[in-house]
Structure formats: structure tokens, C-alpha cells
Image: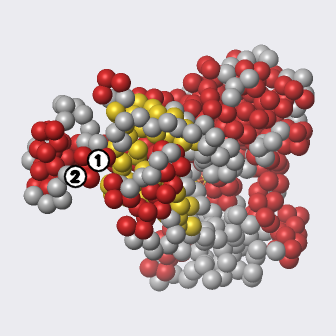
Amino acid sequence: MSQLRAAVGGLRRSGPATHRFGDPAEVEALRGSLLAWYDRCKRDLPWRTLAAAEPDADRRAYAVWVSEIMLQQTQVATVVDYYNRWIEKWPTLQALARASLEEVNELWAGLGYYSRGKRLQEAASKVVSELAGRMPRTAEDLQKLLPGVGRYTAGAIASISYGQATGVVDGNVIRVLCRLRCIGADSSSPAVIDQLWDMANALVDRSRPGDFNQALMELGATVCVPKAPLCGECPVKQHCQARRRVEKELASASQKLFGKPAPVPDVEDCGVGGCPLCPPAAEPWDSSLGVTNFPRKAAKKPPRAVRTATCVLERRGCHGAPEYLLVQRPSSGLLAGLWEFPSVPLAQGLQEEEQKEALADHLQAWTGRPVAAGGLRLIGEVVHIFSHIHQTYVVYSLPLDGDVALDPALSPSRWVTEEEFHASAVSTAMKKVLKACEKRRGMESSPGKGSKRKRGARRQGAGSLCPGTQLSLRAFLRAPTAP
Ligand code: SF4
């Protein structure tokens, strides 16, 4: 890796123009085209409106900071609603510093990557308690002083809120720059990332750095998109080396078709001779991919497969409506502080009966009384993909009769109605789990759709219980297993 860094360092100074922005006139032209396009075409987004209208630098920086954290790994369309609710609830750093983790998780529920919200709240508390409520005023200080603020977020806040002429490199910028300069080496390698930061810092417009950075990201999000970039509509197409390469390939192919000699390669061209920024020799340029030859990434490690048994423990609340037991996850680690149905990790290869035993043992801790594994009913499997985990929830249900005293010595737990469940800080995966249970219940209660066995069980229940009353655990165990 140090050799690659050294080679890239050399290229920054003297390498082929394909990979550099060496001409100041071209840089000026690119800035102008990109900013003019941004002024015409930028999306109307709440954080942009706030940043443009807010005279107070701390409030402006806070508004940008929240948006940047929410936008990490998350689409703009998903973020807008969360952002508006967040800013309405906590319009200032001071308001956020007073919020609890529970409140933050409730608002964040469904947005994913939950540690982001937690870290945002912790960092706001730090600004209020240790920095007298004043946001650091440079990208360097933002990154140094605020937990959870990395180089990208610091650059975005500083350029957009304070007008600091510093670049940003996120996934969209990586894609645009790699295409503009035909960078086909692994774009996640430190050497290439260093090169892209240098490029972003050199390119950023000195008089409108925030707009320039947003324009570059906007271009990546709306025009220079991953799979089918709209090169014909691109405001910087005349500066794009990837497009130039595609045009040359086409010209060369058509010359060959007519039996003419292939064009002589340009001295500024790259692509041969072990260039550290070109695609590796083992994966050369693929004509069928066109500009999407760039960027390239080393293959990701496949996500780790994890299986967890989870139980929708249900009782009848007042007025007969179902209530579900939720327990709170630890305050650190994956899904920190979120609420979930009681769950237990499963060892590889456990059969259904063994899973039930493991889950019943776990449930006993919450219910304070023995739970018969035979009462657990398999609903099915729900798969949820976290960034690095392929999580399968094996879903069981267990209706309880009578009340259950929850042990306050255990982790926090509570009974919630369906409405309360949806307003709680629960993950999207848990919403899928409840949906699976409701779907199963709906199938069983809908005439003509359930199996004979289910219809038989329903008839038996209808004869012995009040309408709307759920089959109790005891009744469930008495229910016939065959018609
Ligand atoms: Fe991206 Fe195409 Fe524009 Fe090049 S011309 S920057 S590949 S959209």
C-alpha cells in the first residue's frame, strides 16, 4: 500500500493529465458550469432553505450537521420527513442536548444506523457543556472536537455553513471524480481516497465552496448516477475523461469497421504501463460498461449470517386489544437502546424444537414463570439486512392468559398496544416481525384462506371464548392438532 501511495504521490505532481486537473482554465470552466447548473437545477431541500436563511452561524451549522448525519447511507427522499420532524422538535443544539436517548431513538426509528442519532445527541451535549454552545468554526476543529464528525461531515458543515474553501468526498463525489478523471483503481483504497481529497480541495470554488460541494454531490445523486448516468445532460461533460474515452472507443470501433487504421493514442492518455490509478491489469476497461467502468471497488466481504429467535409475546389489554411485550436492548452496540420483542441468538443448525427450548428459557426471565416450549408457535422467518449482517429472525408467537409481572431488576421492558409499538423506538426489522404475525393472523381469520386445521382451531376457540378474545396459552395447548 505504501508503494501505491508513493506512486500516487508522484502522479499528483507529474502524472498523465487523464488523472489530474492540471489546467487552471479548465478548473475555472468546470466550476462555472457546475455552479450554473446547480443554480438552475438544484433540488429544493429543507436543510438548504434553512442554511440559506439562517443568520446565526451556530444554528446554521447545526441545521447542516443534522442533515449530513441523516443523509449518511440514506436516501434524500427518506430523510426529508425525519429532518423536518427533528428540527421541529429540537430546533437548536441546546434543545437537542436536553433530549434523552429514548426520545432520539423514537424519532430515528426506521431511519437505520441508529448510532448516528445517539452520537449526534452526545455531540450536541458536548458543544453545550464544554464549548459554551458554540460550534467549532473550521473543518479541522469540527473533526477534532465533535464525536461522530468525520472528515466529510466536517468539510460539509464548514463549507456550507461558514464558507470555508474546503472540499468534501462522499460516495457521490467519489463516483463523479473517478469518472471525470478515469480513476479505475480501487476507490476505497487509502491511496485513491487521498488523491480524491486532494482533487476535491483543489477544485472547490473559492467564492462559493458550500454551493460547489453541494453541486458536486447533487450531480452524483441526480445525473452521474451509478448505473445509467445521464451523460447527455451533464453540465461538465466536456471535462469528463471517462466520456472522452467512450467516444474514442466508439470512433476506433467504427474505423476498424471500415477497415481504416486505429487512431494513434494521445500522449496524455493513460491505461497502460502499470498506472496506479488505472483499472488493474486483471480487470481492464470493459467496453460494454462505458463510463460506468469507473469507479471500481474491491469486492466487499459478504455480510455475516446471524440467526435470532424472537417471540411476539401477546396478552389482552384493557378493552380486549392485544398488547405486546417489548424489551430494551443494551445502550451500546447494534441497535443500541432500541426496543424489540424478546430475542435470543441461535447457534448454527438448531432444529425447531431446540430453538423453542432456547427461546422458552429466555422468555422465562421476562415472564417470571416457566414457559412451556410447546406453546411457542412458529410464524416464519423475517430477513433484515444490516450493513454487515445478514440477519434472519425466526419468529414465534405466544399468547399469554392473565397478567405477567415484569421484573424491574431486568433490562427495561413494557407492554405496548399496536399504536404504541409503532410510536416506539423500534427498528424496521421489528416492524417486519410484527407484520409477519399480523399477516399470519389475518390469513387464519379470513374465511376460505386458512387450512382445515386452522379452521378447526378457530371453531374450537369460538365455542369456548368471548368474541375477540385470543386463544390463551392453556387453550392453545388444548387445541386439536388435526381436524
Ligand atoms: Fe458522469 Fe457522464 Fe458527466 Fe462524465 S459526462 S461526469 S460520466 S454524467
Find out if the beta carbon at label 1 lies less than 8 Å from the nearest ligand 1 atom. Answer: no
Q: Position of residue 68 (x, y in %)?
A: 68, 38
Side of 417 where 477 appears, left or right: left
Give whichever of 66, 351 is nearer the camera.
351
The type of residue carrying mark 1 is Arg
Per the image, the residue denoted by label 1 is 474
- Pointers 2 and 1 in contact (C-beta within 8 Å): yes
Does any portion of residue 255 appear in the rendered image? yes
Q: Residues within 10 Å of mark 2 (few under 14, many from 20)?
A: few
Q: Quadrant of the C terminus?
A: bottom left
* Disc sitting over residue 478 in the figure: 2
Whether residue 347 is situated above or below residue 398 in the rendered picture: below
Give whichever of 113, 418 is nearer the camera.
418
Q: Position of residue 135 (x, y in %)?
A: 85, 28
In space, the residues marked 2 and 1 are separated at their CA atoms by: 6 Å
Side of 159 where 248 appears, left or right: left
Give whichever of 204, 18 is nearer the camera.
204
